[in-house]
Image (spheres, rainbow, N blue to C red):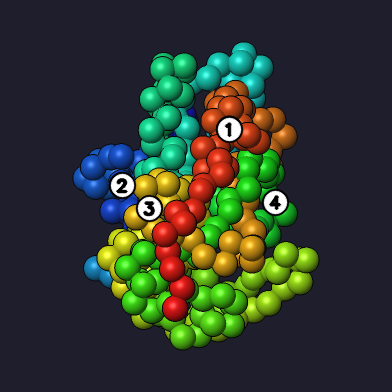
Amino acid sequence: MALDLNALAVYAKVVELGSFTAAADALKLSKSMVSRQISDLEDELKVRLLNRTTRRLNVTEAGAVVYERAARIVAEAAEAERDVNCIEGAVRGRLRINAPMTFGIRELGPVMSKFMERYPELIVDLALNDRRVDLMEEGFDVSLRISSLEDSSLIARQLAPVRRVLVGTPEYFEKNGVPSHPRDLSAHKFVLYSLRSRPELMEFHDPGGKPLTVAVQGSFLCNNADAMDGVVRAGHALCVSPLFICADALRAGDLVSVLDEWETEPLTLHVIYPHTQHLSAKVRAFVDFAVEEFGPGKARWLMNVKKPADVGTK
């Protein structure tokens, strides 16, 4: 008996995600097609694989056995594709990329056409979000990440430091005064990045490298830097902002940075990918492209930003 390998792959995805609808979305199939594939597979095997209710799917004993084998077949097929691409050097297939929302829109999106023109046989599937994703669990090939790294199962390549500065509008500082020391920040309002574990705590380092942590008052918490930037530009509050977000506004004088002699907690832009025996040609191509566009000395936000001299103190 020759089983339908496509049906096995569909079944494995249904069990993995626990839903016909989620599997259909992930595989870019209709829900009816997914349901028919599972029914045909059950008919072919002459066993029930899933018990369906209105609320959930339950895998039968036979279904669990089939899932174990099906998941292994799908994984081996993916590995075979990676090996062949690696051997042949073929940059083709689907490349799933994850990147932070604001960075993806402002920095990555504008250069992706160059990457796609270079590799016309490649299908790029770019997902932008600010949460930390599990590359292996969610099926991403590669990711750009701005943070410190903790997962030892990932391979990471440093691209560029991401310096952050404390910014506000000239009007805000004229109304509320310019802080001369991080301890003065307790008297100011802030917009805070809610995905940090303790967004109200800010870490600074003095010119000698000595750390200082200060607590600030957050009048607005958000999980996206662009939304935060809009509140700051309206003159409502201050923010610690990455230079790739605020550099243009600083050059134009729409925003002003303060306490520049105090360094904020350093972050780094990395390109990361799961550890595999062979690095596929498509992942290698994107890693090389990321180094080319955002590597040392290439990132535009690394350029010095001159601060306007017309902001007084109160």
Quadrant housing residue 289: top right
Q: Position of residue 96 (x, y in %)?
A: 46, 38
Distance between the Cα atoms at labels 1 and 2?
37 Å
Distance between the Cα atoms at labels 1 and 3?
24 Å
Q: Residue under label 4, please give it.
A: 153
Circle on res. 25: 2
- Residue that lies at the very extreme toward the top in this rendered image: 88
Say what secondary structure mark 2 lies in: helix
Distance between the Cα atoms at labels 4 and 2?
27 Å
Q: Residues within 10 Å of mark 2 (few under 14, many from 20)?
A: few
Nearer the camera: disc 1 or disc 3 = 3
Q: Tag 1 or tag 4, which sits nearer the N-term?
A: 4
Residue at figure coordinates x 38%, y 52% from the top left: 253
Above or below, comparing residue 57 to residue 174 in the picture: above
Nearer the camera: disc 4 or disc 3 = 3
Q: Residue under label 3, please give it.
A: 253
Residue at figure coordinates x 23%, y 42% from the top left: 30
Q: Residues within 10 Å of mark 3 (few under 14, many from 20)?
A: some
Distance between the Cα atoms at labels 4 and 3?
43 Å
Nearer the camera: disc 1 or disc 2 = 1
Q: Tag 3 or tag 4, which sits nearer the N-term?
A: 4
